[in-house]
Image: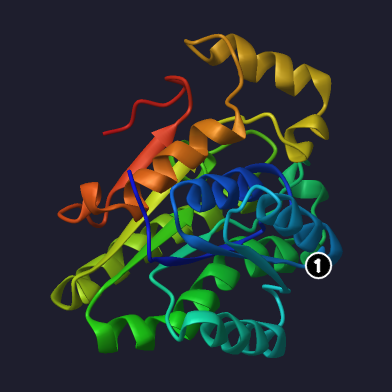
Amino acid sequence: MKLDGMTAVVTGAASGIGLAIGEALAEAGAHTIFGDIAAEKAETEAQRLRRRNLAADAIALDVTDDRSIADFAEAAMAFENRVDVLVNAAGWGKVQPFVENEPGFWDRIIALNLMGPIKLTRAFLPGMMERRSGKIINVSSDAGRVGSLGETVYSGAKAGAIGFTKGLAREMARYAISVNCVCPGPTDTPLLAAVPEKFRDAFLRAIPMRRFGKPADVAGAVVFFASGHSDYITGQVLSVSGGLTMAG
């Protein structure tokens, strides 16, 4: 699947799933722009790809800050005067019983996992509508499809991202802009490492393939949605979970 001549933006691209997605898109030929609040780490990763003769750049981005989003979008557009692919991969969660959550925790979860993708999409959508082409891929979670123990508000925010994907897909189909969603299951990232061991063991026992996902597993699904192979696919939700969830 080749993405030669395309420009892709990936949020949360300094580590974990976002980094794997950014690398995979660059390897497929896209000029990939890494956005992350960890700007130095994002730039280090972009430099690593440039040493491999891949087209990659990094721009500081805080998806919870409106000014940062506006500045990021302007800087990203300045490279090629267009963005063909937007991947909303930035997110965050923490396992904690709902009754122990503080309101500030809810606000952060919703800002990062729901409002961030909504605002980034709004920033790049006008250019895609004008060109009548584009690919938007939201990285949600299987927690948003079936719920997750100790991640109640996170599950709600990720479910919102799924609903946002489907609603926007209906609006944008007339502009030949596809909007799809990838839902990772438990994946070997720093976020999973922070989950208590008893929960990780329970997740692993429940996965039919008996292993955690790898960031590259998710990246492969995103590259498919970014490519021409998915041009007639929109409003879809694809779980990458080793069979943990088999929702239709």
Circle 1 crowding by C-alpha within 10 Å: few under 14, some 14–19, many from 20: some
| In the displayed structure image, the side of residue 146 where residue 32 appears, left or right | right
Q: Where residue 179 sits in the image (x, y, percent)?
A: 32, 62
- Image quadrant containing the C terminus: top left
For the point 61% across and 53% down, the residue is 53
- Residue sitting nearer the eye, 160 or 77: 77
Q: Which of 31 and 201 lies nearest the eye of the viewer? A: 31
**Residue type for callout 1:** Ala
Task: Report the residue marked by disc 1.
Answer: 39
- Is the residue 29 above or below the residue 75 in the image? above
> Who's the residue at 53% across and 79% down the image?
119
Q: Is residue 182 visible?
A: yes
Q: Position of residue 21 (x, y in %)?
A: 55, 47
- Quadrant in the rendering for residue 133: bottom left
Q: Residue 46's image quarter?
A: bottom right
Percent of width and height locating residue 207: 52, 15
